[in-house]
Amino acid sequence: AQSVTQLDSHVSVSEGTPVLLRCNYSSSYSPSLFWYVQHPNKGLQLLLKYTSAATLVKGINGFEAEFKKSETSFHLTKPSAHMSDAAEYFCVVSEYNQGGKLIFGQGTELSVKP
Amino acid sequence: NAGVTQTPKFRVLKTGQSMTLLCAQDMNHEYMYWYRQDPGMGLRLIHYSVGEGTTAKGEVPDGYNVSRLKKQNFLLGLESAAPSQTSVYFCASSYMPRTGGSGDTQYFGPGTRLTVL
Protein backbone atom coordinates (compact mmCIF):
# COMPACT_ATOMS: atom_id res chain seq x y z
CA ALA A 1 0.00 0.00 0.00
CA GLN A 2 1.16 3.49 -0.72
CA SER A 3 2.00 5.92 2.05
CA VAL A 4 3.57 9.30 2.60
CA THR A 5 5.74 10.42 5.51
CA GLN A 6 6.58 14.03 6.12
CA LEU A 7 9.61 13.94 8.33
CA ASP A 8 9.03 17.22 10.16
CA SER A 9 5.75 18.38 11.66
CA HIS A 10 7.10 21.91 12.06
CA VAL A 11 9.92 23.84 10.41
CA SER A 12 10.99 27.35 11.36
CA VAL A 13 13.26 29.51 9.20
CA SER A 14 14.27 33.14 9.05
CA GLU A 15 13.15 35.31 6.17
CA GLY A 16 15.67 35.13 3.32
CA THR A 17 17.10 31.74 4.32
CA PRO A 18 16.54 28.45 2.45
CA VAL A 19 13.56 26.21 3.04
CA LEU A 20 13.70 22.40 3.08
CA LEU A 21 10.56 20.33 3.73
CA ARG A 22 11.19 16.61 3.67
CA CYS A 23 8.93 13.90 2.27
CA ASN A 24 9.38 10.16 1.77
CA TYR A 25 6.89 7.99 0.00
CA SER A 26 6.09 4.35 -0.50
CA SER A 27 4.33 3.16 -3.64
CA SER A 28 3.89 -0.09 -5.51
CA TYR A 29 3.51 1.60 -8.88
CA SER A 30 4.91 4.65 -10.61
CA PRO A 31 3.23 7.39 -8.63
CA SER A 32 2.35 10.96 -9.27
CA LEU A 33 3.64 13.14 -6.45
CA PHE A 34 2.38 16.53 -5.40
CA TRP A 35 3.04 19.31 -2.96
CA TYR A 36 0.04 21.34 -1.85
CA VAL A 37 0.07 24.44 0.36
CA GLN A 38 -2.67 25.54 2.74
CA HIS A 39 -2.67 29.03 4.20
CA PRO A 40 -4.58 29.54 7.47
CA ASN A 41 -8.33 29.03 7.07
CA LYS A 42 -7.95 28.53 3.33
CA GLY A 43 -8.30 25.66 0.89
CA LEU A 44 -5.43 23.72 -0.68
CA GLN A 45 -3.42 25.14 -3.55
CA LEU A 46 -1.25 23.04 -5.84
CA LEU A 47 2.43 24.04 -5.63
CA LEU A 48 3.89 21.49 -8.02
CA LYS A 49 3.50 18.01 -9.45
CA TYR A 50 5.84 15.20 -10.52
CA THR A 51 4.71 12.82 -13.25
CA SER A 52 7.99 11.19 -14.41
CA ALA A 53 8.76 13.72 -17.14
CA ALA A 54 11.63 15.31 -15.20
CA THR A 55 13.06 14.58 -11.76
CA LEU A 56 13.42 18.26 -10.84
CA VAL A 57 10.05 19.95 -10.78
CA LYS A 58 9.55 23.68 -10.58
CA GLY A 59 6.41 25.07 -9.00
CA ILE A 60 4.83 28.36 -8.17
CA ASN A 61 6.30 31.04 -5.88
CA GLY A 62 9.89 29.84 -6.36
CA PHE A 63 9.41 26.36 -4.92
CA GLU A 64 10.87 23.24 -6.48
CA ALA A 65 11.10 19.57 -5.60
CA GLU A 66 13.39 16.76 -6.68
CA PHE A 67 12.18 13.21 -7.18
CA LYS A 68 14.78 10.65 -6.07
CA LYS A 69 13.59 7.13 -6.77
CA SER A 70 16.55 5.45 -5.07
CA GLU A 71 15.77 7.32 -1.85
CA THR A 72 11.97 7.33 -2.35
CA SER A 73 12.05 11.01 -1.51
CA PHE A 74 10.38 14.13 -2.87
CA HIS A 75 11.73 17.01 -0.80
CA LEU A 76 10.45 20.56 -1.30
CA THR A 77 12.91 23.45 -1.38
CA LYS A 78 13.03 27.18 -1.86
CA PRO A 79 16.25 29.23 -1.95
CA SER A 80 14.95 32.19 0.05
CA ALA A 81 11.93 32.18 2.36
CA HIS A 82 9.40 34.98 2.36
CA MET A 83 7.00 35.87 5.15
CA SER A 84 4.10 34.95 2.88
CA ASP A 85 5.41 31.36 2.70
CA ALA A 86 4.24 30.69 6.26
CA ALA A 87 1.62 27.96 5.84
CA GLU A 88 1.00 24.22 6.09
CA TYR A 89 2.52 22.08 3.35
CA PHE A 90 1.30 18.64 2.34
CA CYS A 91 3.18 16.01 0.39
CA VAL A 92 0.76 13.81 -1.53
CA VAL A 93 0.96 10.64 -3.62
CA SER A 94 -1.54 9.50 -6.23
CA GLU A 95 -1.84 6.26 -8.14
CA TYR A 96 -3.85 6.48 -11.34
CA ASN A 97 -4.96 2.85 -11.09
CA GLN A 98 -6.49 3.44 -7.65
CA GLY A 99 -9.21 5.79 -8.87
CA GLY A 100 -6.82 8.70 -8.67
CA LYS A 101 -7.09 8.65 -4.89
CA LEU A 102 -4.68 10.89 -3.05
CA ILE A 103 -2.79 9.84 0.04
CA PHE A 104 -1.75 12.80 2.17
CA GLY A 105 1.16 13.19 4.53
CA GLN A 106 0.41 14.63 7.95
CA GLY A 107 1.61 18.05 6.92
CA THR A 108 4.53 20.33 7.80
CA GLU A 109 3.85 23.72 9.30
CA LEU A 110 6.34 26.28 8.04
CA SER A 111 6.99 29.35 10.18
CA VAL A 112 9.00 32.28 8.82
CA LYS A 113 10.64 34.67 11.29
CA PRO A 114 11.41 38.27 10.36
CA ASN B 1 -14.90 29.96 -14.09
CA ALA B 2 -15.50 29.49 -10.34
CA GLY B 3 -13.61 26.17 -10.06
CA VAL B 4 -14.81 24.16 -7.05
CA THR B 5 -17.30 25.75 -4.69
CA GLN B 6 -18.70 24.46 -1.41
CA THR B 7 -21.87 25.35 0.47
CA PRO B 8 -22.12 26.24 3.33
CA LYS B 9 -18.82 27.68 4.59
CA PHE B 10 -19.65 27.18 8.26
CA ARG B 11 -22.25 25.17 10.15
CA VAL B 12 -22.98 24.24 13.75
CA LEU B 13 -25.12 21.18 14.42
CA LYS B 14 -26.43 19.47 17.51
CA THR B 15 -25.79 15.75 17.99
CA GLY B 16 -28.31 13.73 16.01
CA GLN B 17 -29.17 16.44 13.48
CA SER B 18 -28.73 15.87 9.79
CA MET B 19 -27.31 18.04 7.05
CA THR B 20 -26.06 18.00 3.48
CA LEU B 21 -22.90 19.63 2.17
CA LEU B 22 -22.93 20.66 -1.46
CA CYS B 23 -19.95 20.66 -3.77
CA ALA B 24 -20.13 22.05 -7.30
CA GLN B 25 -17.50 22.23 -10.04
CA ASP B 26 -17.63 23.92 -13.42
CA MET B 27 -14.56 22.30 -15.00
CA ASN B 28 -16.40 19.30 -16.48
CA HIS B 29 -14.38 16.95 -14.28
CA GLU B 30 -15.30 13.27 -14.15
CA TYR B 31 -13.95 12.53 -10.68
CA MET B 32 -15.03 14.15 -7.43
CA TYR B 33 -13.92 13.56 -3.85
CA TRP B 34 -14.87 14.40 -0.27
CA TYR B 35 -12.16 14.68 2.40
CA ARG B 36 -12.11 15.60 6.03
CA GLN B 37 -9.22 17.40 7.68
CA ASP B 38 -8.43 16.99 11.35
CA PRO B 39 -5.47 18.47 13.25
CA GLY B 40 -2.26 16.49 12.78
CA MET B 41 -3.86 13.98 10.42
CA GLY B 42 -3.68 15.57 6.98
CA LEU B 43 -6.69 14.97 4.75
CA ARG B 44 -8.51 11.65 4.71
CA LEU B 45 -10.78 10.48 1.91
CA ILE B 46 -14.42 9.91 2.89
CA HIS B 47 -16.09 9.00 -0.41
CA TYR B 48 -15.40 9.59 -4.06
CA SER B 49 -17.10 9.35 -7.42
CA VAL B 50 -15.65 8.37 -10.80
CA GLY B 51 -18.61 9.67 -12.76
CA GLU B 52 -22.24 10.71 -12.69
CA GLY B 53 -24.36 8.16 -10.85
CA THR B 54 -21.39 6.36 -9.24
CA THR B 55 -19.93 6.55 -5.75
CA ALA B 56 -17.34 4.58 -3.79
CA LYS B 57 -16.04 4.44 -0.23
CA GLY B 58 -12.79 6.00 0.80
CA GLU B 59 -10.72 5.62 3.93
CA VAL B 60 -13.26 6.91 6.50
CA PRO B 61 -16.80 6.45 5.08
CA ASP B 62 -18.73 5.53 8.24
CA GLY B 63 -21.47 7.99 9.21
CA TYR B 64 -21.55 9.65 5.76
CA ASN B 65 -23.47 9.14 2.56
CA VAL B 66 -22.94 10.71 -0.85
CA SER B 67 -24.76 11.17 -4.12
CA ARG B 68 -23.68 12.23 -7.62
CA LEU B 69 -26.92 12.79 -9.52
CA LYS B 70 -25.38 15.42 -11.78
CA LYS B 71 -21.83 15.47 -13.12
CA GLN B 72 -21.11 18.88 -11.69
CA ASN B 73 -22.45 18.24 -8.16
CA PHE B 74 -21.34 15.93 -5.36
CA LEU B 75 -23.36 15.90 -2.13
CA LEU B 76 -22.12 14.73 1.27
CA GLY B 77 -24.77 13.84 3.84
CA LEU B 78 -24.63 13.32 7.57
CA GLU B 79 -27.77 11.48 8.67
CA SER B 80 -27.18 11.71 12.43
CA ALA B 81 -24.31 14.00 13.31
CA ALA B 82 -21.88 13.07 16.08
CA PRO B 83 -19.23 15.19 17.82
CA SER B 84 -16.54 13.01 16.17
CA GLN B 85 -17.64 14.49 12.86
CA THR B 86 -16.51 17.95 13.89
CA SER B 87 -13.98 18.73 11.18
CA VAL B 88 -13.20 20.77 8.10
CA TYR B 89 -14.59 19.16 4.97
CA PHE B 90 -13.00 19.64 1.56
CA CYS B 91 -14.35 18.73 -1.81
CA ALA B 92 -12.08 18.20 -4.80
CA SER B 93 -12.42 17.27 -8.46
CA SER B 94 -10.20 16.02 -11.25
CA TYR B 95 -10.23 14.73 -14.80
CA MET B 96 -9.94 10.99 -15.26
CA PRO B 97 -6.53 9.81 -14.00
CA ARG B 98 -4.56 8.12 -16.77
CA THR B 99 -1.25 6.38 -17.27
CA GLY B 100 1.68 8.77 -17.19
CA GLY B 101 0.15 10.98 -14.56
CA SER B 102 -2.14 13.09 -16.69
CA GLY B 103 -5.52 14.06 -15.35
CA ASP B 104 -4.93 13.23 -11.71
CA THR B 105 -4.39 16.73 -10.36
CA GLN B 106 -7.15 17.46 -7.90
CA TYR B 107 -8.57 20.96 -7.47
CA PHE B 108 -9.92 21.78 -4.05
CA GLY B 109 -12.79 23.88 -2.79
CA PRO B 110 -12.42 26.38 0.07
CA GLY B 111 -13.79 24.00 2.72
CA THR B 112 -16.72 23.76 5.11
CA ARG B 113 -16.05 24.10 8.81
CA LEU B 114 -18.53 21.89 10.70
CA THR B 115 -18.96 21.80 14.46
CA VAL B 116 -21.17 19.18 16.12
CA LEU B 117 -22.12 19.96 19.71
Image (cartoon, grey):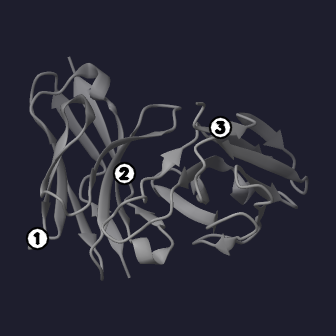
How many numbered discs, if any?
3
The answer to whether marks 3 and 1 sit on the same chain is no
Q: Quadrant of the N terminus of chain B?
A: top right
Q: Residue at x 43, y 77 (%)?
A: A97
Residue at the extreme right = B17
Disc 2 and disc 3: Cα gap in Å? 23 Å
Mark 2: secondary structure: loop
Mark 2: amino acid:
Gly
Find disc 3 in the rendering and name its residue.
B5
Q: Tell me which label, 1 or 2, sits earlier in the chain.
A: 1
Residue density around tag 3, few if under 14, some if 14–19, many if 20 or more, within 10 Å: many
Chain identifier of the residue bearing label 3 in the image: B
User: Closer to the camera: disc 1 or disc 2?
Assistant: 1
- Percent across and percent down for residue A26 are 27, 75
Disc 1 and disc 2: Cα gap in Å? 20 Å
Find disc 2 in the rendering and name its residue.
A107
Mark 3: secondary structure: strand
